[in-house]
Amino acid sequence: MLRKTTLASLALALCAPLAGLAVAGAQAAEEDTYYPTKGNPGVDVYRYALDLTWKPGERTLSGTAAIRMQATAPATSFALDLHRKMLVSKLTVNGVDTAFTHDGKDLVVKTPVVPATPYLVEISYAGKPRTVKAPTSRVDDDKLGWHTNDRGHAWTTQKPYGAYTWYPVNDHLSDKALYDIKLTVPDKWVGVSNGRLDNKVTEGGETRTHFVNTSPMAPHLVTVAIGPYKKYTQVGPHDLPLTYWLPKGRSDLLKPLERTPDTLAWLESRLGPYPFDRAGVVVTPGLGTVETQTLTTFALDNFKQGSADVREQVAHNLAHAWYGASVTPNDWRDNWMNEGVATFLQAKFAVSQGHDTWKFWKREFTRNDGYYREIYGPPGAYFPKQFGQRNVHYGGALLMERLRAEIGTDLFYAALQEWPAQNKDKNRGRATYIDFLSTRSGQDLRPWFEAWLMSGETPAS
Ligand SMILES: [Zn+2]
């Protein structure tokens, strides 16, 4: 998410493992073009069950991860990502104690694996989680993973990676999986995560929550927030449950969020039916806002920009439910596929609310694209150490606006709905997207996209 005002703000059970294979998504055949040390194309996870305890006084996180997975190729061992500060005390595969090594963030499990065979990997671990440096100069997203503050509150931001700072994971957007997350925290606090809150119990000095996700989710879209939270609920279009987790004593933050049903209805009129079973916002003490699935991780700091801006940011992050969460690129080089649409629609939403004119936004897109293509690279080939910058957001939005002019407004908006409808819960890269648009428009758009994605200068048309 980016704000328009300042650059600085560039903002299961063992019995049914095979059932999960159908939702595992298309695993990337190769390492990520941009961040090849994160994730492992040899592993395809289809369910994580995390049972974690946070002790804020000691800043320790401990618990178990039960990972149901298969291998994509025969191998004598396989690796998951887990930060070296998280120490593994026990690891079993299909219930059998298994040897492992843990050098750096590579947790290598020393057992042979073959494709199309389900494995249950159970890992007990504990440690004092810490963030890792983000591959960007953005100041709101300079650290990734498990954050804490001086009061021991905890929250996560992990785009494009960083989930491995707090659980063993195949930390790549191409490996979507189902998540079941249990959190145990001090009794005056609540552990919050994505999905449906199945259970919340406070006893013995602890609060335990259990969240269930019924749609596959990429690791960067998982969120956890722990602190003194109060829950508010609302009903959206088609009785969609909406949940807002706000810091206790900050009910004032609710006001701009309460317009979310209208925002969702506005988005559905452009993008088609909302792709998940719920939506919501958790407000965290950090600076970074992330479009985490079914529950946007919204930085408290962002409320300083005022109600109109908050509503635009909610619109941007909800647009990612269609573009980014339900349909997800399979390589981080295609972040423009998410940010282009989300920023384009955020601007359209701002205009629809009378916040700005379309002329203002087109000028912003053009100005930023011209400037930041040179500084951070073209939208489809950004510099790897400048993740999530304006070249991808504003350049991507300008690309969408020019695409509308190229193929016509009616076809553009029809395709905007058809793409997520046809690719729900999947991973799709630029080639498939461009083929889809070429077929849909009856014109070969490959040269057009090549210029817009890869050129060092803004194309003329
Ligand atoms: Zn975004």
Image (spheres, rainbow, N blue to C red):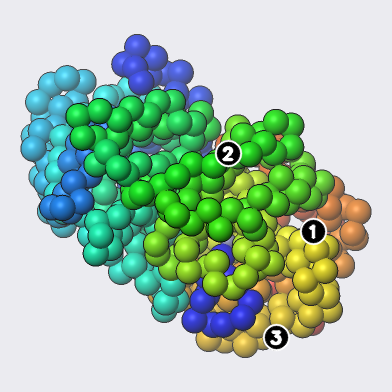
Q: Earlier in the sequence, mark 2 or mark 1?
A: 2
What's the CA distance linking mark 2 and mark 1? 47 Å
In percent of width and height, residue 299 lies at 47, 62
* Residue underneath mark 2: 233
Mark 3 Cα within 10 Å, few/some/many (few <14, many 20+)? some
Indicate the quadrant of ligand 1 in the picture: bottom right
Give the answer, above or below, for where 236 lies relative to 151. Answer: above
* Residue underneath mark 3: 367
- The residue depicted at 49 percent of the width and 35 percent of the height is 195
Q: Which of marks 3 and 2 is nearer the N terminus?
A: 2
What's the CA distance linking mark 1 and mark 3? 28 Å
What's the CA distance linking mark 3 and mark 2? 40 Å
Q: Earlier in the sequence, mark 1 or mark 3?
A: 3
**What amino acid is labelled 3 in the image?**
Arg
Give the answer, above or below, for where 257 lies relative to 461. Answer: above
What secondary structure is marked by label 3? helix
Residue 239 visible in rendering: yes
Task: Compare residues 368 and 268 and report the one nearer the observer.
Answer: 268
Question: With 284 as the anchor, is 98 left or right in this view?
Answer: left
Mark 2 near mark 1, Cβ–Cβ under 8 Å?
A: no
Image-quadrant location for residue 412: bottom right
Residue 187 bears which disc, if any?
Answer: none
Image quarter in which the C terminus is found? bottom right
In percent of width and height, residue 94 lies at 21, 20
* Residue underneath mark 1: 444
